[in-house]
Image (spheres, grey):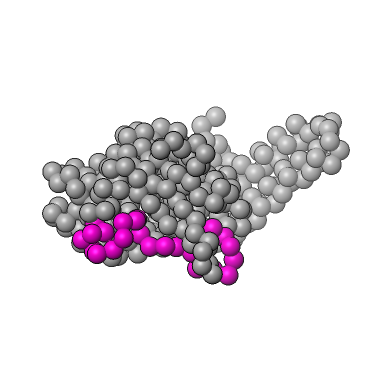
Amino acid sequence: MDLNEYMRRSAETDQMGNQEEAVKLALLGIAGEAGSVVSEGKKWFRDNKLSQGLEENVREELGDLLWYVASLARRLKMDLNQVLEANLQKTREFWSSDMGPLPDYDDHNFPRQKFLRNMEVRFVEDHSGQMTIVRMEPLGELASRAQEEEQRKHKKAQLGDDLDDNSIMDDGYRYHDIIHLAHATVLGWSPVLRALMGAQRREVGEKDRVEDGARAKAIEEGLAAFVFNYLEPYDYDVKHIDWTLLKHVRRTVMDLEVSSQPLAVWRHAYEQAFTIFLQLKNNRGGQVKCDLDKRQLAFFNELQVTE
């Protein structure tokens, strides 16, 4: 049966009165019938076996639940077919495994203002002071690029500053630059990393001011801290990268070039970032390789790396 046809025919038995009252009763009915479905499941879990009549009871409760859903949708003038299609689109967007090619935010003719397609860094822990610090050392071609930038600033050649957790707790935030690397590798976007390696698009229209400027960098740093704190109660288990988190992420970057990226791509970025974050933390450092063409990061500990 077509869902909208069901919604029309269910109206024949809808006796819930005026609009405001009907919406309230429909919402309560949805909650009540959902509870009834769960109650049937409870019997199954409790007895560790399918009880007699379970399928029939669940079918009946689901039917009642759908009746209230149809009543609510009708009162709010919603098309149920469109509601379900939007839901399928939402879940496809979140769970898609096809990321496609990396967006080319570097479509210009200034090579030094582009991300390298392959980058390698080494995260090194330093315990010589009162606080454990981490420095991110560029390797290979990235080291040459970073060295030029640091010489311009009259600083030592490394990516960024020495970092500690900036917290009473030893939570490993000193390794949060892996999030920026994941942003660059999977999304092709990271104003923070651009600044560290001197790849701001200074000669590309408004890109330097708008996309690579102070506001964009502050947004990315805030985003990294937000995602880090969101996953902290779950010990950074990537299974908890959920729809709620990614909706906030998208809202945060809504005015930036990266805002058009599908939620699934953000999910892939953070799954890779926090998988490697835990490896870095547990191994007290290590080497990370970033392949922007494949949109993949890889971790190697010092024993796996041959110089």
Task: Give the quarter of the figure containing the N terminus.
Answer: top right
Left or right of residue 289, residue 255 in this image? left
Residue situated in front as seen by the camera: 307 or 188: 307
Up the image or down, 33 lies above or below 161; here it is above
How far across and down, in percent of the image, does residue 38 sit?
73, 45
Left or right of residue 277, residue 201 in this image? left
How far across and down, in percent of the image, does residue 163 sit?
45, 62
Residue situated in front as seen by the camera: 292 or 32: 292
Residue situated in front as seen by the camera: 160 or 2: 160
Magenta extent: 149-174
Quadrant location of residue 63? top right
Task: Give the quarter of the figure containing the C terminus.
Answer: top left
How far across and down, in percent of the image, does residue 170 sit?
58, 62
Residue 151 located within the stretch drawn in magenta: yes
Q: Which residue is at 84% across, 42% downward?
A: 46
Q: How many marks?
A: 0
Q: Which residue is at 19% across, 53% downward?
A: 201
Residue 127 located within the stretch drawn in magenta: no
Q: Which residue is at 31% across, 42% downward?
A: 140
How far across and down, in percent of the image, does residue 116 sit?
27, 42
Up the image or down, 204 lies above or below 5; here it is below
